[in-house]
Amino acid sequence: MACTENPCGAGSHWVPQTITRVLPTVSTSSLTNRLSPQALVWEPQEIVPGRGFTVADAVRAYRDFDGKRGDKQERNKEAGYNTLRFHVLRQNPNGTPRKGDAKPLGDVLFADLTSEMLKEWRDSLIDFDLAKKADQRKYNASRSTAKRTWAVLHSCLEQAYLRKSNGITRDHAEAWRKVPALGVDENKRDVVFTLEETLRYIDAARANGDHAEADLFEAYASTGARAGGELVSLSVGDFDAGERSLSLPERSEIRAARPALA
């Protein structure tokens, strides 16, 4: 704006004036030179479902899986996770890498999983040298361990697939669903001691001076509790003297109770 006639005095009036500003000229080549090379060559990348999500990601998520009915016990969650961490991530209980040349399966992307890869990994858990030595009992135990470990991993992979946000497709899921089963007959671990055998083992432990071990064996035999957290988690409140019964902690979806021995 500019003030004419009597500048800013009485009777003056305002007359709009046009102010022109000259902006510096910027050439296209100059602007291009100031852009980063990455910005000039950027192109949209195709998003591959399951790409970037690894087996290790699934293992970590499986740690908090509550079971199909939502009542999986904490110790069973921890046991399943430790199994996968040891065999799949190849980590010791303290988190350090296990020795050996085997590549951890946890590094593999879901998009890269194949049935052949998973079968080879599962079969690597079996000690085939035991079969060559005709030690059928230990060989069957080795196969049984491989089968149980594979069942845990199969469940882990399936749960990762069911979470849609992971971007895992049905084609990816075929990788573990098509792995042939090991069979069931030779994988049984049914080892049941008779009452006479049980008492003989307990008496032999005491005679050898292993009194603590003998007490532990007797506790297992008397309660039917599993080795590990099931027995040590019991308290006085779990014993009902009137009913002569002992209540054991829940085993995943099943609650078990056994009568106390006299």
Image: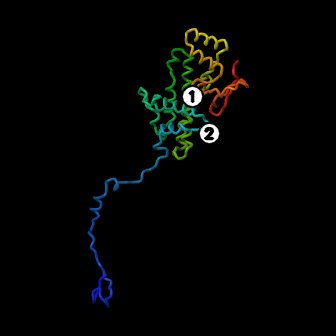
- What distance separates the C-alpha of mark 2 from that of mark 1? 21 Å
Question: What residue is at 55 percent from the left and 18 percent from the top?
Answer: 138
**Residue 150 spot, x, y in % from top left:** 55, 30
**Which residue is the site of mark 2?**
70
State whether residue 23 is above or below residue 212: below
Q: Quadrant of the N terminus?
A: bottom left
Q: Quadrant of the C terminus?
A: top right
Q: Nearer the viewer, mark 2 or mark 1?
A: 2
Residue kind at label 2, given as amino acid type: Gly
Viewer-side residue, 97 vs 124? 97
Residue kind at label 1, given as amino acid type: Arg
**Residue 44 spot, x, y in % from top left:** 41, 53
Q: Is residue 190 left or right of residue 209?
A: right
Point out the residue furthest to the right here: 243
Q: Which numbered circle lies on residue 148?
A: 1
Viewer-side residue, 208 vs 29? 208
State whether residue 14 is above or below residue 148: below
State whether residue 20 is above or below residue 85: below
Q: Residues within 10 Å of mark 1 (few under 14, many from 20)?
A: few
**Residue 115 spot, x, y in % from top left:** 52, 34
